[in-house]
Amino acid sequence: MFEKRKLLMKTAYEKAKKELNRTKTSDVSVMTFLSLELEAHFGTSKDVRTFVRYHKRLLKDNKDYDIDEITLDQLSWYVGYKNFENFCENYSFEKDKGDTKIQLKIDHDEESLSEKLSKIIINITNTPVFNVPQMAKNGMGIGMLALVLFTGLSYGGNGNVSDNGNKCMYWDGDEYKLTSCNDKNPKHQLLPVDTVKLKYFKKITKPDTLNVDNSLGNIYYSKYNNEVEFFTMDGINPNTGKSLKDATEHMLTKYAGNYVE
């Protein structure tokens, strides 16, 4: 997922820089603007130093760097998508060539070059849709196809998010539940479905079963109004909106089960 994280970070950075609209900008000023935009919308965001670190590692150093799923979803929202999965599936690049508009679309699978190329869909406004494999059959070599791909990757842009009426979820207090996007229950705050959170993100309702041996490094917590809640994944506590932290030995010993020698 390195390339997709890198592409998302590049797109978010460029949009923030454009919206900041200053003659001279630094990475810190751009990331400050980005962090504030996310915090204004979601109520919480990574700090400026974290975003600067993401940008430096992924774009300047060209090295992989892990970004948590909540932040990936927030950045995807900022550049016009429902979540990171939607960004990976629908991100596209457009290039105008006279009266012809070419759109390159790549799905989220990261495989070999030829396999990636086979998944590119090109839409031209004055001809029917055709795909890259057909172009290859018509005599265009892999080198030229790679050039097309490279050219497309040099252009930013947002895709149109299509609404899937059957894939939403809501937080029921302990875990996410799958529901229709047409769910009218006023108590359900609908979110685009995230299959990872749906399956793995849960509140631990029996913290007395936790101890240092079985939970240290695996469990996360938040403390709000002197109430501590434990969760199975990192992210944000849906009940309070607070960021989760790694459950330390102290937190497990004091608020969960007893320390096991």
Image (tube, grey):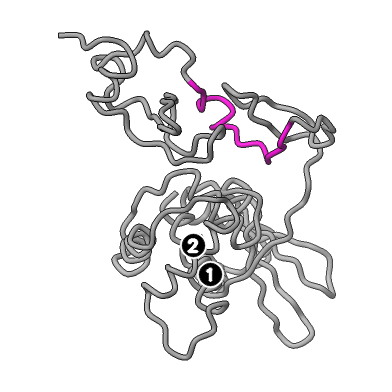
Q: Is residue 105 above or below residue 246?
A: below
Upstream in sequence: badge 1 or badge 2: 2
The extreme bottom residue here reads 23
- In terms of secondary structure, where does tag 1 sit? helix
Q: Residue at x 51, y 23 (%)?
A: 202
Amino acid found under the numbered disc labelled 1: Leu
Query: Which quadrant does the C terminus fall into?
Result: top left
Alpha-carbon distance for marks 1 and 2?
9 Å
Q: Is residue 251 above or below residue 123?
A: above
Is 198 within the magenta? yes
Q: Is residue 142 left or right of residue 207?
A: right
The extreme front residue here reads 225
Marker count (numbered):
2
Dot label at residue 7? 2
> Badge 1: few (under 14), some or many (20 or more) residues near its Cα, within 10 Å?
some
User: Which contiguous range is marked in magenta?
Assistant: 188-203
| Front label number (1 vs 2) | 2
| In-front residue for pair 232/250 | 250
Q: Is residue 239 left or right of residue 51?
A: right
| In-front residue for pair 64/56 | 56
Q: Residue at x 75, y 28 (%)?
A: 179
Q: Is residue 147 above or below residue 4?
A: below
| In-front residue for pair 35/153 | 35
Q: Position of residue 68 (x, y in %)?
A: 43, 44
Is 27 within the magenta? no
Q: Position of residue 64 (x, y in %)?
A: 34, 54
> Badge 2: few (under 14), some or many (20 or more) residues near its Cα, within 10 Å?
some
The residue labelled by disc 1 is 153
Q: Position of residue 211 (x, y in %)?
A: 28, 13
Q: Is residue 82 left or right of residue 147?
A: right
